[in-house]
Amino acid sequence: MKTISLQDAVAMIPAGATLMVGGFMGVGTPEPLIDEIVRQQKKDLTVIANDTAAPGVGIGKLVDAALLRRVVVSHIGLNPETQRQMLAGSLTVDLVPQGTLAERIRAGGFGLGGVLTATGIGTIAEEGKQKIAVDGRDYLLEPALRADFALVHAFIADYLGNLAYVLTARNFNPLMAMAADTVVVQAENIVPVGVVAPDHVMTPAPVVDYLVANG
Amino acid sequence: MDPQSTIARRIADELRDGMLVNLGIGIPTLVANFVPAGIRVFFQSENGLIGTGPVPEPGMALPWLTDAGGRPVTALPGASTFDSATSFGLIRGGHLDLTVLGGLQVDRHGRLSNWMVPGKMVPGMGGAMDLVAGARRVVVAMQHTAKGRPKIVRESSLPLTSERAVDLIVTELAVIAVRDGRLTLIETMEGVTVNEVLNMTEVELIIAPELASAGAEAVRRSLSAPSTGGAL
């Protein structure tokens, strides 16, 4: 794990990259990283996340700046700008049931090829998917998801990169921290090693590649 | 009482002590206002919280303690938080006793459509498909008609949320159960006649035996008469 400046962290991301971004309606999204992506005008990005938040909030800022080519999300209902770009044809939106999205990301980080879920059976969500019967019940085969970068928000990171999240800001963050080639963490608090007790570490340090330094 | 509160109060009668319950946005959220006295219900927010409490006092909001719409909430004593995989493991894994969801349409088989209107509104399914596929019991909270047209229809004109039939539909006019794959009228709301319900419903409803017998409505109302005094 290396510490890195905000500017250098975002400079690593090439145009056209695929990013996983933590957060649920902007809660638990690493906002400074988002602001810096906008400042550096990284374009043609694909974002995998729960939602596109709202205009001016979290991932919504990337939508506002028209930096996204594709999003893989469960919900865009609170962001009219996402819907506008989708209908205009400038943004591709892949809608995935929320629990399926979480499991596809988990599978990507846990070395699994995908997961079997009954969610979406008999709906348009099953189009193009393989069906597999187990013990007489049908499931959809949902492939694993990975990304070039995961942008993770933590409440606490220690100097080694051990992470703990807070309340509902946890959401997709620990799943994404396992599922990307390069994991970049922005933490509200950076603390000495030992401050976070082993049992309270939610993401172990070895999976973190970069911790964004304060200030 | 306004239609939304009528619906929410009736659904609250389905709550039992110790249940884990997920409430969708809109009318379902109001159910939390009518929890019967003396029982404890665990409300889940799918963004990763069990024990969701009321909105905080002014100045007490925490940006990292929110409901599924991103609005600040509080957490009740005994609350717990977890990641999104665990949250949907609770939903799909048979741990969620009851979900209450809003609806755009329900078809004659009791199948719900509630996540998109093609060409008009595409919010995404969020957690709705997982909730209907996975919850032990699914209750739909919706107004009986939209712009005067029935929402309980023979064939849904909207994409389904799940192939699984829901268990109960509660509107401001009636309570309809899905029994043996058939929509069955089991209650009418106060002041509403069976014929009124039938006229506002596109699907031919089975009339439950307990409702068909004369006076059953009155009996039911006297049994489940709500305590007045205004919790709201």
Image (tube, coloured by chain):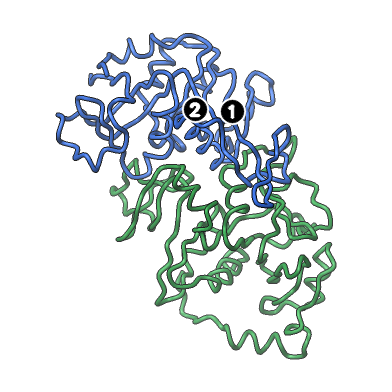
Chain colours: A blue, B green
Which residue lies under the disc numbered 1?
A: A82
Which residue lies under the disc numbered 2?
A: A60
Q: In which quarter of the view is residue B13 placed? A: bottom right
Residue flagged by tag 2: what amino acid is it?
Gly
User: In the image, is residue A92 above or below residue B28?
Assistant: above
Task: Tell me where residue B138 appears, x and y as whole percent.
Answer: 61, 61
Q: Quadrant of the N terminus of chain A?
A: top left
* Secondary structure at numbered mark 1: helix
Mark toward the start of the polypeptide (1 vs 2): 2
Q: Is residue B92 left or right of residue A28?
A: right
Task: Tell me where residue B140 appears, x and y as whole percent.
Answer: 64, 60
Q: Are marks 1 and 2 in contact (CB under 8 Å)?
A: yes
Task: Tell me where residue A105 appears, x and y as whole percent.
Answer: 50, 32
Residue sitting at 47 percent across and 25 percent down?
A20
Q: In which chain is the residue bearing label 2?
A: A
Q: In which quarter of the view is residue B170 placed? A: bottom right
Task: Tell me where residue B219 appears, x and y as whole percent.
Answer: 66, 89
Dot 2: few (<14), some (14–19), or many (≥20) neighbours within 10 Å?
many
